[in-house]
Amino acid sequence: MMDNHDIEALERRLRAVEDRLSIYNLISAYGPAVDACSIENNAELWTEDSVYKVGGLGEYVGHQGLRDMIEGPFHQDVTNGGSGHVLSLPHVHLDGDRAVATNYAKLFAHRDGVFTLRRLVVSRWELERRDGQWKIRRRTNVLLDGSPEGKALLARTPEGLDASNT
Amino acid sequence: MMDNHDIEALERRLRAVEDRLSIYNLISAYGPAVDACSIENNAELWTEDSVYKVGGLGEYVGHQGLRDMIEGPFHQDVTNGGSGHVLSLPHVHLDGDRAVATNYAKLFAHRDGVFTLRRLVVSRWELERRDGQWKIRRRTNVLLDGSPEGKALLARTPEGLDASNT
Amino acid sequence: MMDNHDIEALERRLRAVEDRLSIYNLISAYGPAVDACSIENNAELWTEDSVYKVGGLGEYVGHQGLRDMIEGPFHQDVTNGGSGHVLSLPHVHLDGDRAVATNYAKLFAHRDGVFTLRRLVVSRWELERRDGQWKIRRRTNVLLDGSPEGKALLARTPEGLDASNT
């Protein structure tokens, strides 16, 4: 007979699956929030003590930092012309209430009827469950312009959290 | 002891997870269907009473409308040259037998050995389970050319179905 | 009352869901492995007897073949300049210890400060569980340059494994 122990193991596995899908939903909400220039929608995705390191552009700390990013000249210029921050399916390592994910982020921009790929980066996301909600604690982008830093971050994709000392 | 009530709750959660994965499989089948110009593969994804509003190009109603779209000059021209309707990981809200999803759709086109991004839109998908199969009931695309309509649709990403009066 | 039979059915469904997520994690690890030029990270994703047919470029057999691909002049040139092998959300058919998936693969390349889409292909992946790990057994890419081969492979997206005689 199946006993409570088996059912509890099943429930733990189900929760891990739900967590992975919540993380997909978290990451797929980022692009629409910033392309809409919605300070509220974007802040909702990050912890209060978040750190967002954008290779070649700056480091944004906390919700105020994220607001500064959206209100800054680079972001305003690119979104006014028309933009898509399109993130690829992330590779996710889950470990209880924390997770790390790696994917590509593309910034497509529209200008004078033409769409171009303005930036292509690798992103490493450190995620945490806070009050039952998955949030972004730290995100690090490196531009894929042939520099060794980009390849180094990409090479860390199979690593779990223990190795996560970004 | 675990009782039937617990098991039923587990089954409901599992079904929601399966639904999300079915929705991913539905949306990821769209691009291949239309790039192959397969009227049958595409019709299979939509309800009989579907409505597809393509910003700047037209509105296609039902399976006949979808067929007209594929057979139309814009679609024939772009697919004959080589094309990829590439959809990003959708952000999904699930509510029983209905769901709403938001993502980006890119139309890459090949011409004379060169690939370009021809169109970049935000898509809002209204989905329904019909006879046990998830189908597209309504899809609305808005071109991301800097217009306020694009930003407005992107800003609705966190909204569930109640707010879905597209 | 729920009995063992019901619980076992639940467990089977849960395992299928876990398999789909493992397959997503497998496919999303490919791009980072090859853009990092990591022979080890890439080999980890494939069976020992893998076959990778890359339309217009060659056929790579086994782990030695994959190593040759990474060390070859085309791959070295494109990754030295900066690159992103970005794969779209796959459409997956699961059948026990085997699966087949279809998606798009884009190769974005950086050169002199500009990012371009160098290649756009449709990929058909034949996957197997080996020693409890999902691996790539065979992958076939066809360039989407308007050729009938590209449309033919895209049209096979709804097919399961029985029809998989690539």
Image (cartoon, coloured by chain):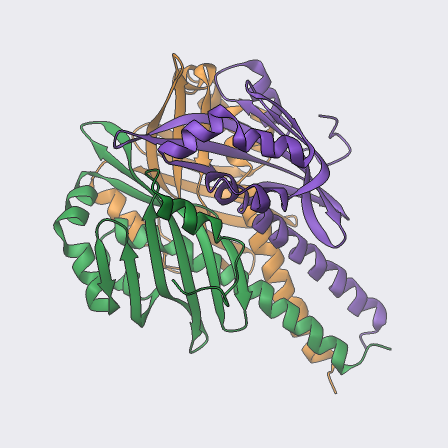
Chain colours: A purple, B green, C orange
Tell me where residue B47 sits by quadrant: bottom left
Q: What is the number of callouts on the image?
A: 0
Identify the residue at image location x=74%, y=65%: A10
In the picture, which quadrant includes the C terminus of chain A?
Answer: top right
Q: Is residue C18 above or below residue B86?
A: below
Identify the residue at image location x=62%, y=56%: C18
Q: Is residue C25 visible?
A: no
Taking depth in this image into account, of C42 and A157 the one nearest to the observer is A157
Q: Is residue A79 visible?
A: yes
Q: Is residue C142 above or below residue C67?
A: below
**Residue B59 on image: x %, y %:** 23, 59
**Residue C10 on image: x %, y %:** 66, 71
Q: Is residue C80 above or below residue A67?
A: above
Identify the residue at image location x=73%, y=30%: A164
Taking depth in this image into account, of A68 and B66 the one nearest to the observer is A68
**Residue B118 on image: x %, y %:** 27, 37
Residue, far left: B73
Residue, far right: B1
Taking depth in this image into account, of B127 and B21 the one nearest to the observer is B127
